[in-house]
Image (tube, rainbow, N blue to C red):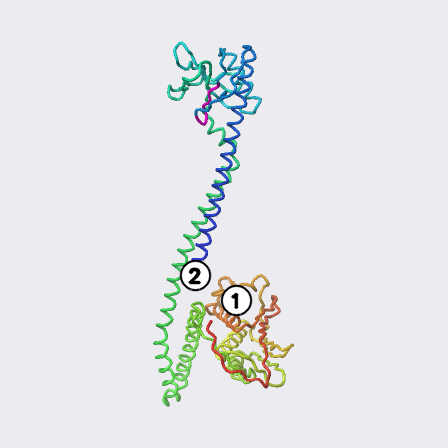
Amino acid sequence: MHQTVIRRVIFLGLVAIIGIVGMQTYWVTTTWNLNDTEFRNKAKLALVNVARKLAAENESTLPNDDIIRPQSNNYFIVNIESEIDALRLETLIQQELIRLGMDLPFEYAIFDCTSDQMAYGGYCQATSEEIEPEKLEDEESYLAPDHNLLYYFGIKFPTRTGYIWQKMQLVVFLSVILLLTIAFFIYSIIVILKQRRLATMQKDFIDNMTHEFKTPLSTIRIAASVFQRDEYIAADSRLSRYAQLIHQQYERLNNQVEKVLQISRIEKGNFEIKKEKIDLKALLPQLINSVRARTDELAGELDTHFSDGPMPVLADPLHLSNIIHNLLDNAVKYGGNPPKIEISARRSKGQLILAVTDHGPGIPPELHERLFEKFYRIPTGDVHDVKGFGLGLFYVKQICRAHGWTIRLNSQPDKGTTFLIQIPLLSTSSLPAPQLITT
C-alpha cells in the first residue's frame, strides 16, 4: 500500500470519526435535553395537581402565578398559600408521580414559619412504601427555604440524573458501541502503519540484496564465458559440462534477480514502457526456439499454431518478450512429465488472441484469482519440485495492465491450463511513431 493511500485512509477515517462523534454527541445532548425537559414538565404538572388538591381540601385558592418555583434542576418549591398536612402531602405526591409514570424517589420538606426553616419530611419512593435504608447526610437532605413565601413546601429529586440516564439506555449502548468501533479503527490504523513500516524495510532489504547480486553475477557470467571458450576445457567433456552448468545456473539466478528488480520498479511506479509497432510473428521464433530446447531435453512437445500474415501490435518489445517467456517457462515447469505445450496466435474482431496451453495437472477454480498475486504459489504440501519466487505471473499481469491488454485464465484440474492475452491489432499500413509511457 502506497504512502499516499495510507494518508488518504487515515485522513478520511479521521474525518469520518469526527463526523460520527459530532453526530453522536449532538444526538446524546439532544436526547438528554428532551428527557430533562420531559422530567421538568412532568414534575411541574404533578406538583401543580398536588397544590390544587391541597387547596381544594383546605377550601383555599392558589396564587395566580408562581405556583411552582424551580430552584435547581431537581429542586422545586410549591407555593399554595394555605396550611399543609405532611402525611396528606406525601400521599398526594406519591399518587401524582405514579400517575405520570415518574417512579423515582423524592425528598420533601414543609416551611415552618415558627422556626423560619424547612421542616424535613422524609425520603420517599413514588409508592406507598417509605424508604429508610440509610440516613441521608445533612448537605444532601438540605432543602433551602424561600423567604418571600409563607405557606409552601419543597420537593427534591436526588436521583434525577440516574433517572434520565436510565431512559437513555439505548443511546448509551449505541454510544459505547461507537467508542469501541473508533478504538478498533485506531488500533487497525496503528497495525497498518506498523505493517507498512515492516513491509518497507523488507522491500528495501530485498532491493538492496538483489542489486548487490548484480556485480558477482556479472563476474560469474564473464568467468563462465571464458571457461566455455577455453580450448583445454572444451576438449575435456567433464570440465565442459561443469562450465555449461555454471552458465546455466548463472542464467537461472540472473533471471530471478531481474524479476525481483522489475517487480520493484513496477511497484515504485518508475518503470518505462516504450511502445512501438512490432510484428509479433517476427518476435516469437527466437522465444519458441529457446523453450523448444528445454522441451526437447525433457522429451516433450512444443506445437505452434499461427494465423497467416503479419501480426502488427503496439507494445514494448522487451516486456512483451518477457511475458511470453514467463508463460512458456511456466508451461514447461507445470506442463506435465514430459511437458506438452501449445502456443497459438489468431485474429478475432480486430484483436490478437495469444494463447499458451499446457497439458499439466491444471488449477482448481478457487485459486484462479490468487494466481496473479505477488509471491503466490499453488500449495503443493511439503513437495517443492518446481523452484521459483512466485513473481512471474504477477509480472505478466502488471505488464498487461500497463499496456491495456486483457489476460484470462482457463483451467480445470487434470485438464491443463491456458493463458490468453488479448492485444489490439494495428493496421498493416499504419506506422505510428514510438511513444514513451511512464507508469
- Magenta residues, as a range? 72-78
Q: Residue furthest right?
A: 349
Give the crowd class for mark 1: few <14, some 14-19, many >=20 residues within 10 Å: some
- Disc 1 is placed on an element classified as helix
Instruction: Report x, y in % for residue 292.
Output: 53, 81
The label on residue 141 is none
Q: Amino acid at mark 2?
A: Thr
> Does the magenta segment cover residue 374?
no
311 in relation to 77, above or below: below
Question: Along the polypeptide, which appears first: circle 2 or circle 1?
Answer: 2
51 in relation to 377, above or below: above
Q: Nearer the viewer, residue 257 or 317?
A: 317
From the image, tell me which residue sits under label 2: 4
Give the crowd class for mark 2: few <14, some 14-19, many >=20 residues within 10 Å: few
Q: Amino acid at mark 1?
A: Phe
Instruction: Say which residue appears at 63% left-offset and 85% top-offset.
Output: 308
Q: Nearer the viewer, residue 81 or 41?
A: 81
- Disc 2 is placed on an element classified as helix
From the image, tell me which residue sits under label 1: 372
Report the number of discs.
Answer: 2
